[in-house]
């Protein structure tokens, strides 16, 4: 019987360590996602700006023709 108690306590320790590792991975992943979401927002804004400049440039070319 004591062997089972020892195994259970070892299992509980391993389980606690895994829970800590999972929490750390989730925390790091959240930071990664936040950073990339911010970068994506900047790039989308830049694309819109470039697209609007392209339309203006195209309109100027048409007027010249």
Image (spheres, grey):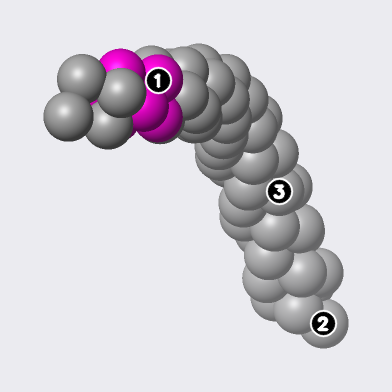
Q: Nearer the viewer, residue 39 or 62?
A: 62
Give the residue drawn at x 36%, y 27%. 59
Q: CA distance from mark 2 to mark 3?
A: 27 Å
Q: Position of residue 22 (x, y in %)?
A: 63, 47
Q: Say whether disc 2 or disc 3 marks the residue closer to the N-terminus.
A: 2
Contact, CB < 8 Å: mark 3 with mark 1? no
Q: Which residues are magenta?
A: 54-61
Q: Is residue 10 above or below residue 7?
A: above
| 6 up-or-down from 22: above or below | below
Q: From the image, tell me which residue sits under label 3.
A: 19
Q: Earlier in the sequence, mark 3 or mark 1?
A: 3
**In the depicted view, which residue is nearer to us: 49 or 10?**
49
Q: Which residue is mark 1?
A: 56
Give the farthest residue toward the front: 65
Tell me the distance, in whole angstroms, between the alpha carbons under discs 3 and 1.
55 Å
* Disc number lying in front (2 or 1): 1
User: Residue 36 versus residue 15: which sits nearer the camera?
Assistant: 36
Residue occupied by mark 2 = 1
- Distance between the alpha carbons at the discs numbered 2 and 1: 82 Å
Residue 6 place in picture, x, y as percent: 71, 64
Residue 2 placement (x, y as % from top left): 79, 72
Q: Are marks 2 and 3 in contact (CB under 8 Å)?
A: no
In the figure, is residue 6 to the left or right of 37? right
């Amino acid at each position: 019987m004591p062997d089972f108690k020892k195994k259970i306590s070892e299992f509980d320790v391993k389980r606690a360590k895994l829970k800590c590792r999972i929490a750390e991975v989730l925390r790091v992943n959240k930071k990664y996602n936040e950073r990339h979401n911010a970068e994506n927002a900047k790039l989308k804004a830049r694309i819109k700006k470039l697209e609007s400049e392209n339309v203006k440039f195209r309109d100027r070319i048409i007027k010249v023709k």
